Amino acid sequence: MTEGLLTRRRFAVLGLGALVGCGGPRRSGVVGMSAPGAEAVDGAGSLKAHAAARGIVYGCAVDVEALQNDAGYARLIREQAGMVVAENAMKWAALRPGVEAYRFDEADALVGFAETNGMKVRGHCLCWHKGLPGWFAGEATVENARGLLVEHIERVAGRYAGRMHSWDVVNEAVEVRDGRADGLRDSAWLRLVGEDYVEVAFRAARRADPQALLTYNDYGLEGEDGDSLRKRVAVLQLLRRLKQRGVPVDAVGLQAHLTVGDRFGPGMMAFLAAVRELGLQVFVTELDVDDRKLGVGVAERDGAVGRVYGEFVGLVLHEPAVNVVMTWGMTDARTWLKRADGAGERCLPFDEKELPTPAFFALRKSFDGRRV
């Protein structure tokens, strides 16, 4: 791709209704930058600009190493995102190579990049049952785990105090299938710290950063199936317990790792309304659409993925509590999703060549449809 094409990004949008609506799938054509009907997808045409015009913050997860070493990737993030979150650089394993040792180079680089480019930053994540360093299993005990958790949160959130839009304070604490009456996951944190570990984490985060929006983040809340319903019930029970105890939680993160064929509707919307009634904001935090159930045909996959983006984002933006939409990545070249057949996933707003996909246009159209 030439520098001019990457920087100016003007493409013809052909058959968009078919791509994200009810008709058969067609791909957008790429034409000369001065072609009649060409449409800018940068500047005023970018995702962040269309989102901001409707009071929404759009952003994405980033690979910090690529941000530092791939100029084209960094330019695409600057062009499209109003907020960034690290895929891995702020997780325990990345930040804490030893019990007493911290490594902040990548996290610092991300915050510096965002501040230089006028972006907001989300932190992900302060407490999770995964993403723990290798030493944790041998060093963390019932006697010291609470102290390890509090010290980590105070050290990490405190380092960036006043500079973060929000933190995923606790990630994925609910697992209904573990069979507990309170719905909590049978995790190392539960076993070592106790049933109040979620409360401990949020209170520590508020002490460390009084300004950041403190978020409970989870997956599997979007569907109309029984598993999603039961999980929504358990998450609401957790949120109500926290609110009743005066725990400083400000928002719920709806991860939204979706798959072509998923259905979402009144169950999810009732959940979002209940979250709003608790006085909480809602962030879509990790949106992508897995196409592995489809064949390898690019046009079919692009059309199907674009339609899921349009249906989901268009729906959740009817809820006034939703004011952030983050995709888990910007380009298919760096997605965590993999297909068994080796065909690259077509799951994000830009493809492996950093050309906009139907998901891009579906997102932008959904932002434009938000009532303000």
Image: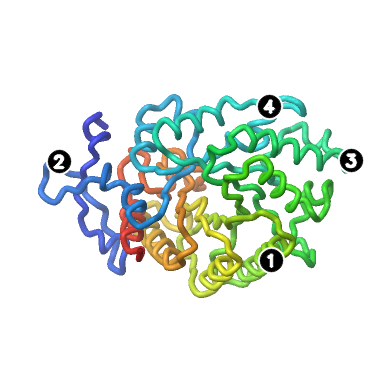
**Label 3 vs label 2, nearer the camera:** 3
User: Which residue is label 3 attached to?
Assistant: 143
* Tag 3 near tag 1, CB within 8 Å: no
Q: CA distance from mark 2 to mark 4?
A: 49 Å
Q: CA distance from mark 3 to mark 1?
A: 29 Å
User: Which residue is label 1 attached to?
Assistant: 240
* Tag 1 near tag 2, CB within 8 Å: no
User: Which residue is label 2 attached to?
Assistant: 32
The image quadrant of residue 162 is top right
- Quadrant where the N terminus sits is top left
Q: Position of residue 217 (x, y in %)?
A: 61, 53
Q: Residue at x 45, y 33 (%)?
A: 115
Q: Position of residue 336 (x, y in %)?
A: 52, 43
Q: Residue at x 65, y 66 (%)?
A: 236
Q: CA distance from mark 4 to mark 1?
A: 34 Å
Can see residue 300?
no
Can see residue 10?
yes
Point out which mark residue 93 bears: none
User: Which residue is label 4 attached to?
Assistant: 102
- Name which of mark 4 and mark 1 comes first in the sequence: 4
Label 4 residue SS: loop
Label 2 residue SS: loop
Q: Position of residue 200 (x, y in %)?
A: 76, 49
Q: Position of residue 186 (x, y in %)?
A: 78, 55
Label 3 residue SS: loop
Q: Is residue 45 left or right of residue 200?
A: left
**Circle 3 residues within 10 Å: few <14, some 14–19, many ≥20:** few
**Label 2 vs label 4, nearer the camera:** 4
Say what amino acid the circle numbered 4 marks: Tyr
Say what amino acid the circle numbered 3 marks: Glu
